[in-house]
Amino acid sequence: MGSLLVLLSALAFGSMAVMAAAAYGQGVNVTTLLALRFAIAAAILWAIVSLRKEKVSIRRRTWMYLFLLGAVCYGGQSFCFFTAVEKLNPALAAMLLYTYPVIVYIVSLLLGKEKVHWANLLALAAASAGILLVLGASLDMVRLDLSGICFGLGAAVIFSVYLLLSDRVVKEVPPLVMTTYISSFAAMTFALSGLILGELHFSLTGQAYGAIFAIALVCTVVAILALSAGIERIGPAKASILSTIEPAWTVFLSFIVFGETLNGSQLLGGVLILCSVLLLQLKNKPDKTNR
């Protein structure tokens, strides 16, 4: 049951980029999409927290730390990732984001939190080669949107920072409560920035609202709850390995929905990135649940 929950979570997370692309096709902009996504998700999560009678009172210092994680880190990562989806395509954006485990290892190594290991070095080499191939460095680089590439890699970097910083909070706050606060602060950030910049537009089609609601409910709330429940049953190590199906599902779903395909070099690059992540996951035991 635990493995099925983790796989459900991976499929839900992996569907997010495709759902976002569908929303863009209906005229939705990034700010409106994210403001609604986090507002809907936060409302549902607060309802679940209330039903479970979770303890939500936290220290002021922790509250400020959660604000930083939600408004700056998670909000920034989401903006970069969804912008990359808009400028590139769901498959490429997902592959670029999924380099974050390698970035986390590099930063941890520089900070002295990790030791050099042959498996990790091999993972770094595979990831580096994979990134070059995914971007089509030798074939189609000139055809790719460079700003989209920057946003995709930026999402991976910011998410890595988010994971490293959240280690301090996750020891004090239950995962569900932490996610609820972070989603709430992210919603506030996009709502406020959208109002100031005039980028909030709610005259959308029913299909657009359907895609946004699916992102909030399925790709956010269900994905997070399923992953948390799965980790409780099978542990973080096995869960992290099963979750590597996520970018592969994005590529497959992108092909089914939009007919988008990756060329041979990009597919090989994706395989190398997944292999690098597997090497790191087999050695380490990450247990974060946000995306």
Image: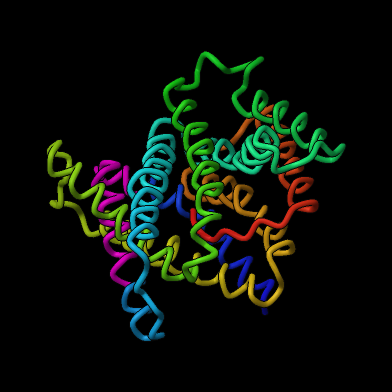
Quadrant where the N terminus lies? bottom right
Residue 223 is one of the magenta-drawn residues: no
- Residue 41 quadrant: bottom left
Residue range (magenta):
22-44
Dominant SS of magenta comes to: helix
Residue 137, position as x, y percentages in the image: 63, 17
* Colour scheme in use: rainbow
Describe residue 135's horizontal placement relative to residue 177 as left or right.
right
Residue at image coords 41%, 70%: 177
Residue at image coords 66%, 23%: 132
Residue 44, position as x, y percentages in the image: 33, 72
Describe residue 96's horizontal placement relative to residue 199 as left or right.
right
- Residue 261 quadrant: top right
**In the image shown, does 173 or 140 lie closer to the viewer?**
173
**In the image shown, does 87 or 38 lie closer to the viewer?**
38
As drawn, 281 above or below 1: above
Question: What is the residue that sits farthest to the right in this orientation?
Answer: 118
Residue 275, position as x, y percentages in the image: 76, 43
**In the image shown, does 64 or 80 lie closer to the viewer?**
64
As drawn, 44 above or below 37: below
Residue 175, position as x, y percentages in the image: 49, 68
Residue at image coords 58%, 75%: 229
